[in-house]
Amino acid sequence: MMIAVAIGIIAFQFGQQATVASQNSPDLSERPALPVIVTNTPTQTSTPTATSTPRPTSTSTPTPTPIVVITKIDSLGQLETTEYAMQTVIDLENEPSNLWERLAGSDKLMLLAEGEVIAGFDLTKVTEADIVVDGTQVTLALPPAEILRSRIDNERTQVYQRETGLFVRPDTTLESRARQLAEEALVEWAIERDIFDQAERDGRTQLENFLRSLGFTEITITVKEEES
């Protein structure tokens, strides 16, 4: 019985406390609604910076000038384009100077000679007026082809036969004169076989390749006529 009364008292007190707490607690439903403040902060969008694209710079191609070309051609000096190698036989005899030499014989020899003849162009004769340049076009007028060098090969040249008359003193100049005649004969032989025409053809090819290496694309090469 006493336990029941105690439980009742505790329940009563607990109920009172709950009532007081509920009376003191503010009614959330009667609270004024808090104003909602919306702050409109503008978003800063970064403006793209205009980047200037550099224009491609045109690369200027240097155009060869006549002075440059003439300097380079002059540096070539003599342009050897064609070489003929050949052999010849020279019979040379001194003319008898008296009756005895006519009877006993004078001095004579046979020379077997070997040598070469070289033809081409003397480019030091090219003047500024002989070269016309227009951009990558060039016109070149060459002097006539000529014999630039001829020589006897001493190692391959020899006296094949020599006869000296009785009581006749040998002529010390006979062999040298024979060699000179042999060289002249070689030059003559080369000219008869159109060494100049061959030199012109070879020279055009060589100079065209040379001018192309300087940057020219249209090349005209002419050869002047031989002055009479």
Image (cartoon, rainbow, N blue to C red):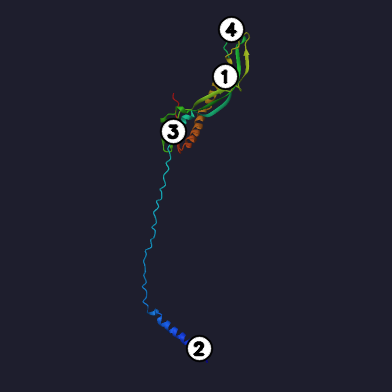
Q: Which residue is drawn at the image coordinates 61% and 16% (left, top)? A: 109
Tell which of 225 and 66 is nearer to you.
Answer: 66
Secondary element type, mark 2: helix
Question: In the picture, which quadrant includes the C terminus?
Answer: top left
Mark nearer the viewer, 4 or 1:
1
Tell which of 138 and 52 is nearer to you.
Answer: 52
User: Which residue in the structure is indicated by mark 1?
Assistant: 179
Mark nearer the viewer, 2 or 4:
2
Disc 2/disc 4 C-alpha distance (Å): 193 Å
User: Which residue in the structure is indicated by mark 2?
Assistant: 6
Tell which of 211 and 181 is nearer to you.
Answer: 211
Does residue 90 sit above or below 31 in this rendering? above
* Amino acid type indicated by mark 1: Arg
Secondary element type, mark 4: helix
Disc 2/disc 1 C-alpha distance (Å): 164 Å
Disc 4/disc 3 C-alpha distance (Å): 69 Å
User: Which residue in the structure is indicated by mark 3?
Assistant: 68
User: Which residue in the structure is indicated by mark 4?
Assistant: 99
Mark positioned earlier in the residue sequence (4 or 1): 4
Mark positioned earlier in the residue sequence (2 or 3): 2
Mark positioned earlier in the residue sequence (3 or 1): 3
